[in-house]
Image (cartoon, rainbow, N blue to C red):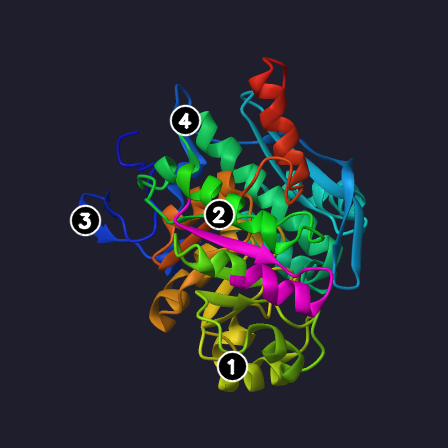
């Protein structure tokens, strides 16, 4: 590409630029993402998009999952596609939580994104967000915006025959694998021991259990996992507690790797109180579908560990913008499921990633991913 450097914009990469060497950080993404331009016979050519689309996919669960008061009979997903004019295709999917995510993509995001995009997903993200920050800053529209961004990054990387991490000049980091076990939550402590053993035998370095059918059962299940002494244990209280005292009845005195998402969104004061009482680290953030996350948790000292999900919190481009901030704050990150995507994102960023989550087969944590893997094993199309 001559002076055009396709790697310009990689976090922390040193690249040749106009005959010199330049250190690139996330501050430099805007306007210098030279991967957006390709040298052709007639000079430089922008990458254009031929398709941005989304559809809703509903996966009915074999057994309903009840997390506290939250009953899940089916998992609804938004599956997003970005196709470049050169034929390269990127995909991304995430839970829609019952919201009109696919509709937001197809009506609010797709027409403008196709018009704006010239090959640089980070610049396209910034331009579109500043045009429509009110709808795109939270909720279903942010979920759709996040998925379009991820799919666009994958399409651009594929156009050069690379993974997303490779496109940013990164090799995939070895991040601890955590198995999500204990589904369905009605399963008793007598079943937990063999699940821990199976997870560790499969390569898990830790296990995480969801809230059980009752607070008492939740505690019994956690103790059963701890008693195996095979690996670290964390628990997802899945927004089931109303007060710090409620949470302490479940986890008080237990030696946990972390306690996760005890309260519904908007519970900063409750988080801070619980953090002051716990002997274990506190984590939160799974479904904080707004762009005050993760800064709101960081700046208020509400948590010890950030839970981040690129599929609903702005995609990769948002995290590239926050890379320097997160690196400076030095809070560890635990990634919310979607291991295929989050292993790539975690490898690009300059943050400490303490876990990538994997769903045990049949657990219905990420039912669509389980279905895709099952079809691949059967030799079918995914």
Residue 342 higher or lower than 302, as above or below: above
Q: Secondary structure at mark 1?
A: helix
Q: Secondary structure at mark 2?
A: helix
Q: In terms of image quadrants, where is residue 377?
A: top right
Q: Residue at x 53, y 58 (%)?
A: 224
In whole angstroms, how far apart are the C-alphas of marks 1 and 2? 27 Å
Q: Residue at x 39, y 29 (%)?
A: 162
The residue indicated by pointer 2 is: 196
The residue indicated by pointer 3 is: 21
Neighbour tally class for label 1: few under 14, some 14-19, many 20 plus, Cα within 10 Å: many
Q: In terms of image quadrants, where is residue 314?
A: bottom right
- The mark lying in front, picked from 3 and 2, is 2
Q: Earlier in the sequence, mark 3 or mark 1?
A: 3
The disc label shown at residue 160, or none: 4
In whole angstroms, how far apart are the C-alphas of marks 2 and 4? 41 Å
In whole angstroms, how far apart are the C-alphas of marks 3 and 1? 45 Å
- The mark lying in front, picked from 1 and 2, is 2
The residue indicated by pointer 1 is: 275
- Which residues are the magenta region? 204-223
């Amino acid at each position: 590409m001559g002076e055009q450097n396709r790697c310009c914009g990689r976090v922390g990469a040193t690249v040749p630029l106009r005959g010199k060497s330049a250190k690139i950080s996330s501050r430099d993404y805007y306007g210098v993402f030279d991967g957006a331009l390709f040298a052709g016979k007639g000079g430089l050519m922008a990458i254009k998009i031929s398709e941005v689309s989304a559809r809703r996919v509903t996966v009915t669960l074999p057994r309903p999952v009840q997390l506290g008061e939250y009953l899940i009979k089916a998992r609804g997903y938004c599956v997003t596609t970005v196709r470049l004019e050169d034929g390269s295709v990127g995909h991304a999917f995430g839970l829609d939580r019952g919201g009109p995510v696919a509709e937001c993509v197809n009506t609010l995001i797709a027409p403008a994104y196709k018009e704006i995009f010239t090959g640089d997903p980070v610049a396209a993200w910034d331009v579109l967000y500043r045009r429509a920050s009110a709808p795109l800053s939270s909720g279903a529209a942010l979920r759709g915006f996040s998925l379009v961004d991820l799919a666009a990054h994958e399409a651009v990387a594929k156009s050069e025959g690379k993974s997303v991490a490779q496109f940013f000049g990164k090799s995939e980091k070895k991040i601890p694998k955590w198995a999500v076990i204990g589904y369905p939550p009605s399963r008793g402590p007598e079943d937990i021991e063999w699940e821990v053993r199976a997870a560790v035998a499969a390569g898990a370095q830790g296990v995480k259990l969801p809230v059980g059918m009752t607070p008492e059962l939740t505690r019994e299940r956690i103790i059963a996992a701890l008693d195996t002494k095979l690996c670290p244990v964390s628990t997802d209280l899945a927004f089931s507690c109303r007060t710090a005292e409620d949470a302490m009845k479940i986890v008080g005195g237990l030696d946990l790797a972390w306690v996760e998402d005890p309260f519904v969104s908007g519970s900063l004061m409750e988080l801070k109180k619980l953090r002051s009482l716990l002997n274990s680290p506190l984590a939160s953030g799974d479904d904080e579908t707004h762009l005050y996350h993760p800064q709101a948790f960081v700046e208020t000292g509400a948590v010890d560990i950030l839970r981040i999900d690129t599929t609903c919190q702005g995609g990769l481009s948002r995290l590239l913008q926050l890379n320097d901030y997160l690196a400076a704050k030095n809070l560890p990150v635990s990634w919310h499921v979607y291991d295929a995507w989050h292993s790539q994102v975690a490898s690009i960023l300059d943050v400490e990633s303490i876990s990538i989550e994997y769903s045990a087969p049949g657990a219905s944590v990420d039912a669509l991913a389980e279905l895709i893997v099952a079809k691949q094993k059967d030799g079918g199309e995914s």
